């Protein structure tokens, strides 16, 4: 029987690798280099539309200083 902690660790590594692959696919499809951290911000803006930084930060559960 596999140790549950070890199995969780393996699955987290697979998830992170998959997310990196998703980021590469998004960048290639868009034709522009976008940092991985910016993809979440852009997705938030696409949902919110024009918004203040404070609104975007609150929506993404980030500190305003992180967004600005």
Image (cartoon, grey):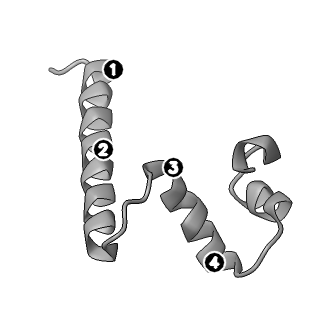
Judging from the image, what secondary structure is the residue with disc 3 in? helix
Q: Nearer the viewer, residue 8 or 47?
A: 47
| Disc on the earlier residue, 4 or 2 | 2
Q: Which mark is residue 5?
A: 1
Q: CA distance from mark 1 to mark 2?
A: 15 Å
Q: CA distance from mark 1 to mark 3?
A: 28 Å
Q: Nearer the viewer, residue 46 or 27?
A: 27
Q: Nearer the viewer, mark 1 or mark 2?
A: 2
Is the residue 28 above or below the residue 24 in the image?
below
Where does label 2 land, which residue? 15
| Disc on the earlier residue, 1 or 4 | 1
Horizontal and vertical percent for residue 55?
82, 64
Specify whether 53 is left or right of 15. Answer: right
Q: Which mark is residue 37?
A: 3
Q: Which mark is residue 58?
A: none
Horizontal and vertical percent for residue 17?
25, 42
Where does label 4 land, which residue? 47
């Amino acid at each position: 029987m596999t140790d549950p902690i070890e199995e969780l660790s393996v699955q987290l590594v697979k998830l992170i690798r998959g997310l990196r692959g998703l980021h590469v696919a998004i960048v290639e499809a868009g034709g522009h280099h976008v940092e991985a951290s910016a993809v979440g911000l852009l997705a938030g803006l696409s949902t919110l539309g024009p918004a203040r930084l404070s609104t975007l930060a609150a929506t993404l559960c980030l500190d305003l200083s992180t967004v600005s």
